[in-house]
Image (cartoon, rainbow, N blue to C red):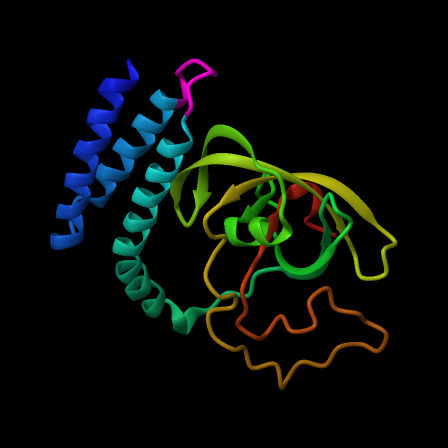
């Protein structure tokens, strides 16, 4: 498909998204169309400048995320009384300039990839490489990943490090756990050092490490 035709379709998507924002329905259809048109754009010759297109498509997805957020919030509220504690850890990430940043990660033994939030990737000043990869299993939906980055992770005493590829997504998950956990009845054996000393406090998650590092 030629870029002129794709630009017309992009304009039509803006109008459809406006209706979604007004009436609160049809978001799944618009998201599918955004994914389809993104794939067509990325199929164009490599010398085609898509910088403006990338920005506009990201803005469309951001608006769609904000439209769906109230519905997700209601769903999360319904689940608050059955909070599940995910495996989390605190570690450090080093960027290409040698700067180290503390971060909180989820350890997911069922994931075959590593993820990083767009906000944290920007904070680290990591160089993004363009890709197009649909990823399933994030918040029970499918997201199209458009960039990846590389960074080096360390544990607290730097006895372990590894350079990893991370796929960049807008957000890993909400606050984890969603509510504070009561740990007054838990007694840890002496000498045990927790991977995340404040695992019981709701906090932001910066990255997700897949199966290769689920026992990090």
Query: What residue is rendered at 30% in x and 18% in y?
Result: 3
Q: In this rendering, does residue 108 appear at all?
A: no
- The location of residue 64, given as percent across then percent down, is 28, 48
Q: Give the residue displayed 45% in from the left and 61% down from the top.
A: 174
Which residue appears at 54% of the width and 69% of the height? 203
Q: Dominant secondary structure of the magenta stretch? A: loop
Dividing the image into 4 quarters, which one contains the N terminus? top left
**8 over 101 or under it: above or below:** above
- Asked whether residue 78 is in view, the answer is yes
Q: Quadrant of residue 141?
A: top left
Q: Nearer the viewer, residue 70 or 38?
A: 38
| Nearer the observer, 149 or 198 | 149
The reply, left or right, for residue 137 in relation to residue 187 is left
Q: Is residue 4 left or right of residue 110?
A: left
Residue 81 rendering spot, x and y as whole percentages: 40, 74
Locate residue 78 relative to residue 212 in the image: left or right: left
Q: Is residue 58 magenta?
A: no
Q: Nearer the viewer, residue 45 or 148?
A: 45
The spot of residue 116 in percent (x, y) is 57, 48
Tally of numbered tags: 0
Quarter where residue 159 is shown: bottom right
Q: Is residue 113 left or right of residue 99?
A: left
Measuring from the top left, give residue 153's x and y in whole percent: 74, 49
Provide the residue span drawn in magenta.
Answer: 42-49
Is 180 above or below relative to 32? below
Who's the residue at 24% across and 41% down the image? 28
Magenta stretch contains residue 48: yes
């Amino acid at each position: 498909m030629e870029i002129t035709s794709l630009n017309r379709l992009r304009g039509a998507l803006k109008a459809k998204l406006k209706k979604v924002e007004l009436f609160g329905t049809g978001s799944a259809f618009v998201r599918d169309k955004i994914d389809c048109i993104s794939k067509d754009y990325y199929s164009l010759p490599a010398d085609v400048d898509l910088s403006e297109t990338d920005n506009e498509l990201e803005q469309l997805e951001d608006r769609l995320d904000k439209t769906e957020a109230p519905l997700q919030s209601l769903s999360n509220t319904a689940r608050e009384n059955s909070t599940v504690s995910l495996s989390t850890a605190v570690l450090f990430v080093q960027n290409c300039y040698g700067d180290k940043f503390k971060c909180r990660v989820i350890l997911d033994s069922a994931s075959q990839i590593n993820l990083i939030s767009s906000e944290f990737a920007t904070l680290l000043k990591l160089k993004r490489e363009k890709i197009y990869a649909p990823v399933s299993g994030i918040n029970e939906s499918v997201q199209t990943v458009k960039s990846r980055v590389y960074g080096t992770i360390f544990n607290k005493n730097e006895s372990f490090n590894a350079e990893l590829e991370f796929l960049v997504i807008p957000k890993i998950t909400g606050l984890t756990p969603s509510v504070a956990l009561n740990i007054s009845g838990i007694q840890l054996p002496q000498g045990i050092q927790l991977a995340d000393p404040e695992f019981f406090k709701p906090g932001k998650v910066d990255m997700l490490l897949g199966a290769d590092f689920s026992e990090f």
